[in-house]
Amino acid sequence: MDRALTASERIRLPTRPIYRRLGDRLFQIVVVALGLSIIALALLLAEVLFTDGLEPLRRFGFWGFLTGTTWDPVRGVHGTWPFLVGTLITAIASLALSFFPAIGVAIFSAEYAPRWLAGIVDTIVDLLAAVPSVVVGIWGIFVLVPLMQSHVYLPVYFWAFENAPGLLPVLGPPAGYNLVTAIIVLALMIVPYTTALARDAIRLVPRSQREAARALGATRWEVMRMAVLPYARGAITAGAILSLGRAIGETMAVAMLVGNSNTLPFTFFGPAATMPSVIVNEFREAVEDLHLASLMTVGFYLFLISLTVNLIAAWLQRKLAVGGRSL
Amino acid sequence: MAVTAPATGSAAPPAAAPRGLATVTPEHLRRRYRRDRFMIGLLVLATAAVLVPLLIIVWYVVSNGISAVLTFDFYTQDLGSPARALQGRPTGLGHTILGTIVVDALALLIAVPIGVGAGIMLSEYPDHPLNPVLRILNDTLNGMPAILKGLLAFSLIVKPMGTFSGISGAVALAFVMLPIIARATEGVLRIIPWSIREAGLALGLPRWRVVLNTVLPAARVGVVTGILIAFARAAGEAAPLLFTSFGNNFFSSTPLRYLMGPVDTLPARLYSLAISPYKEWHAMGWGAAVILLVLVIVTFVGTRIVTRARHATDL
Amino acid sequence: MDPVTMPPTVPSNPKPQQAGQGEARATVVAHAAPRMVTEGITVLYGKTVGVHDVSLTFRDKTVTALIGPSGCGKTTFLRALNRMHDLSRGVKVTGKAVLDGQDIYANGVDPVTIRRRIGMVFQKPTPFPTMSIYDNVVAGLKLVGIRDRALLDEVAERSLRQAALWEEVEDRLRAPASGISGGQQQRLSIARALAVEAEVLLMDEPTSSLDPQSTMRIEELIQELKNTVTIVIVTHNMQQAARVSDYTAFFYEGDLVEVSDTNTMFTNPKQRRTNDYITGRFG
C-alpha cells in the first residue's frame, strides 16, 4: 500500500480492502437487522391486535363493534362504543383543561422567568412528566377522590337536587370514582407534555422576531402575542395533539379512578370507562374466549385511534411549521 | 463650540411638529402596560397551578409511605396473603423489588442493543431505502399506549409459554423503551459533525470502525441520557406488566422462576395494593409509591448530571 | 438639553468644506440640525466593555454610517440608540442619548414609546411570517390601538410606497409576508418601521443578507428616505458607506476613533487607524 500512514498504522488499520469491505458489509447487515426488528415490531403490533381480535370483528362487524353500545361478557355481546366515548370525553376535556395553563407555564419559563427560576420550573415540569401513572393513581384514590367527593361532588349534587333538578341526570349520583376525577388526573398527567413541547417551540422562535416586535414599540406581552406565539403556533398545536394522544393512551391512573362502568350514558359524577381502562380491568379476569378477543379488539381500535392522532400531529407539525425555507 | 451654528436655522426641528399616528397617548400606554402586568399575573398563576399539584403528590406519597419504607421487613420479606398483614406478621415487598430489578434489567438488556442499533441505522445509513419507513414506524411505536405493548407481549410470549413470566414482562417493557432509545440515539449521532466521520474515513478506517470507535464514543453521553429517559419511562409502567409478568405474592422458589414464572413488579404491585380492601396493604402501597418515585427521580437526576457533565467538558 | 451645548467630541465639522465638489448631499449637510445626540454612551456586557464613551451627533435628514471591523462595537452602539439592550440580561448602558432634547435613558422615559419613535431594521429581514404583507405594515399601528380601516389602508399604502414596495405587492397585500423575496421582505421591514412614523431609522447591516440588486434598491431607498427621517446605518461594506452616507463614524475596539462627513472620511482621514481600515489594511 503506497499510502501507509503512521497514524493509521498506530490504530492497526486493517489494510486489506477485502477485509474492510467485509467488515462494513457485516456491520451494515447487523445494524439494518436491528432497525428491521423495530419495523417488524410495529407491524407485528398491528397484526397481532388485529388477528387476536378478529373473532369479535367477524361476529359484530367493523362498524358494529365500533358502534355497539352493549358490553356484556356474560351474554357474549361486545361493542366498544361506551369506551370510545369515555376515552374521547376524558382525553379532550383533559386537554381543554390543561392547555392554557400549560401554555402559560411554557411562556413564563421561556420568556419571563429569570434563568434560575426557569431552571427550577422546567425541572419540576419534567419531573411531573416522569411521575408514574400508578403513583398518581394511588394519590387519586386516597387523597383526591375523598376530597372531591366531600367538597365538590356531594355539595354540587345536593345543590342541584334542591335548585336545579334538571341537572341531575347529567350529573349522576356522586360516586367519587367518575369522569370528572379521571379528567382532572389526566389533565395533571398531560400538562407537562404540552408544556415541554410548547416551551421548546417558543424557545425556537428566532431572537430577531422578538426584536422586530420590540423595535415597533411592543410591550413584553405584545411581543408574545404579535411575534412569538404566532411563530410557534404550529409546533404548539402539534404538541397539544401529541398530548391528546397521550391522554387517549393513558391507562393506570384512569383505570384506578374512572369507576369502571360499561353502560352508557356516562354522567359527570357517575362511573365511566375508557378503552385502556376496560382492558386493564377485565383482561386478567376474562375467561371466555370471546371476552378476551373482544378486549384485544378494543386494543386494535385504540391502536387505530392513537395512530390517527399521531399522524395528525406529525402532519400538523409539517404543515404549520414556520420558517425554514420561507425565511 | 457652537457646532450647530452653520446650520441655516431655516428648518425648525421637525420633531416639534406632533406626528399624529405615532403618538402614544399616556392613557392608552397605561392600559397596555396594565394588560402586560395582568398577563404576567396570569402566567405566574398558571405556573403555580401546574407546579403545586406535583409538590402535593410528592408530599402525600412521602408522608404516607415513609413509615413503610423505613422498616427492615419491607425489603426482606415477601407479601404473602392478606392475613399476614392483618395479623401483624412480618410482611414486605422484598420479592417485588427483586422482581423489578430482574425484569427492568432484562428489559434494558433487550432494548439497548436493538434501540442503539436502530438509532445507528437511522443516523449512519440515511440512504438506506428502509430508513424513512423505520423512522415513521419508530415514531408510531413511540406514540402507542404502553398497554398495547403489553397485549403484544401477551400474545407473543405468554400465550405460547402458557404462563405469565418475568421474560414476557421484560419484553413488554423493552417494547416501551425501544423507540425512545432509537430516537435519542439517532438524535445525538446526528449532532456529531460529519467531519469527524470523514476524518476517520480519510485515515482509511472502515466505516464500522469509524462508527464504533469514533462516532459512538463521541455521542455516548447523549446515548446514555436517552437510555436513562427510556428507563425512567418504562420503570413506572404498570399497564404492560399486568398481563405479562402478572404478579406474585412470594419470593420465587428458584432464580429461574423469576424469568419463567409470574413475578412481582413495583408498579403492578402498587396497583393491586391500592385497589385492595386492606388498610395495611394501602400503607405498603404508599411505600411502593415512594420507592418508585425515588427510582424515577434518581434516574431523572442522573440524566441531568450526565448532561451537565457533558456541557462542562464542552467548555 | 440644548444641542448647542454639546461636548466638543461631537464630530462633525458641520461646515460644508467640500461643498465645492458639487455633491448634492453636501448641501443637505449644510442645513442639517442635530436630531439625536449621544453623550458618553458606554455599553457593558457584564465586565466586558462593548462600547466605550461614544459621543456622536446625528443630524436631521442625513445618513450616518457606522463602520469598523466586526466586533468593534458599531452594532452594540446602534442598539443602544433605541434601548434594545433593555432586553438583554447583563447588559448595562450608561451615558445619554438625547432625542429632541430628551434623554431616552432618563428616569421615567418609557422605552416602548422611544422605540416607536426610533425604528429599527435588522440584518436579516424580519417580517412576521404568519401575518399578511398588509398586517405586517400596520402591525405597529394596531399596537397603539388604531383600528380605523381607512386610516390603516392609507398608511399601509403610503408606507409601502415610501419603501418602494407598493408596485410589487399592491395586488397581493393579503398574501403571507413569508412568500416574498428577501429583498422585498427587507423593504417590508422598512415600511413597517415607517408606518409608525419613526423619526429616526436605525439600520443594522440591512443589506448583508441580500443579493446585489436588492442591495442597490435598498441603497436608493435610503437616499429617498433621508428626506423624511434621520438614518443611522451600520455597515461592514465601505463602498456602501461611501455611497449612501453623509457622515461616517469609524469604530474600533469599542471606541469611536473618528467621525466626519463621508467625503473627508474617505479622502482624507485624520487617524492612521481609520486610514488603515479604509484602505483595507485590516478589518
Image (cartoon, rainbow, N blue to C red):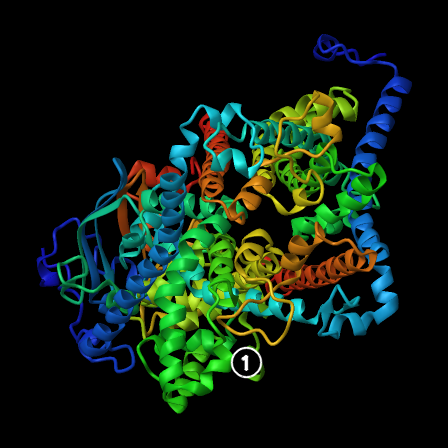
> In the rendered view, does A316 fall on the left or right side of C278?
right
Secondary structure found at label 1: loop
Is residue C186 in view? no
x and y, in percent, of residue B96 in the image? 58, 31
> In the rendered view, does B202 fall on the left or right side of A22?
left
**Crowd rating for badge 1 (residues with CA inside 10 Å; few <14, some 14–19, many 20+):** some
Name the residue nearer the viewer: C202 or A47.
A47
Instruction: Choose top left, top right, bottom left or bottom right for residue B109.
Output: top right
**Amino acid type of the residue that numbered disc 1 sits on in the rendered structure:** Arg
x and y, in percent, of residue C180 in the image? 58, 69
Q: Is C223 situated above or below B205? A: below
Name the residue nearer the viewer: B2 or B56.
B56
x and y, in percent, of residue C119 in the image? 33, 66
Q: Is C30 situated above or below C81? A: below
Name the residue nearer the viewer: C207 or A127.
A127
Instruction: Choose top left, top right, bottom left or bottom right for residue A116.
Output: top left
Q: Which residue is mark 1?
A: C174
Name the residue nearer the viewer: A272 or A205.
A272
x and y, in percent, of residue B37 in the image? 26, 65
Quadrant housing the N terminus of chain B:
bottom left
Instruction: Choose top left, top right, bottom left or bottom right for residue B249.
Output: top right
Chain letter for mark 1:
C
> In the rendered view, does B246 fall on the left or right side of A172?
right
